[in-house]
Amino acid sequence: MIFLQKDKYDLCLVFLQKADALAVRHPKHLAITLNNKACYYRKTNKLRTALQCLQEALNLEWKSRK
């Protein structure tokens, strides 16, 4: 997220993809990663993709509370 704040979008995406791969088996970490990816996509003006990430993160959060 530091790279996102510094407008280094390429590096941000690389680290988000790595985080995504590491979080696959951990729903709470995956939800956080999806939220961070949504921030990236919002900042890069890919609003539909950002919304999809947020919806997926919300679904994971709901499932983990049941």
Image (cartoon, rainbow, N blue to C red):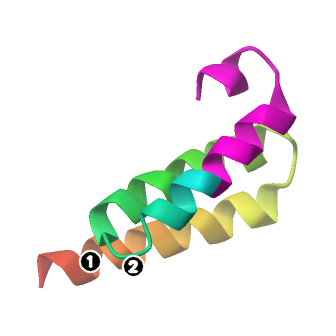
Amino acid residing under circle 1: Trp
56 relative to 54, above or below: below
What residue type is disc 2 on?
Answer: Asn
Q: Left or right: 22 with respect to 28?
A: right
Dominant secondary structure of the magenta stretch? helix
The residue indicated by pointer 2 is: 59
Report the disc number at residue 20: none
The image shows residue 21, relative to residue 47, as above or below, that is below
Q: Residue 52 sits in which quadrant?
A: bottom right
As helix, strand or loop, the secondary structure at mark 2 comes to helix
Q: Residue at x 75, y 45 (%)?
A: 13
Q: Is residue 14 above or below residue 66?
A: above
Image quarter of residue 27: bottom left
**Which residue sits at x=40%, y=62%?**
31
Is residue 32 or residue 11 the one in the foreground?
11
User: Residue at point 60% right, 65% down?
Assistant: 53
Instruction: Indicate the secondary structure of the residue bearing disc 1.
Output: helix
When the figure is inspected, residue 58 is found, relative to residue 50, above or below; the finding is below
Residue 22 placed where, x, y %?
46, 61
Q: In which quarter of the image is residue 58?
A: bottom left
Q: Quadrant of the N terminus?
A: top right
Residue 54: x and y, percent? 54, 63
| Residues at circles 2 and 1 in contact by the CB criterion of under 8 Å | yes
The residues bearing labels 2 and 1 have C-alpha atoms spaced at a distance of 5 Å
Region of the chain picked out in magenta, as a range: 1-17
Q: Nearer the viewer, residue 19 or 43?
A: 19
Using a 10 Å C-alpha cutoff, classify the residue at mark 2 as few (fewer than 14 neighbours), some (14 to 19) or many (20 or more).
Answer: few
Q: Can you tell which mark lies on residue 62?
A: 1
- Is 48 magenta? The answer is no
Residue at x 78%, y 33% (from the top left corner): 11
Magenta-span inclusion, residue 10: yes
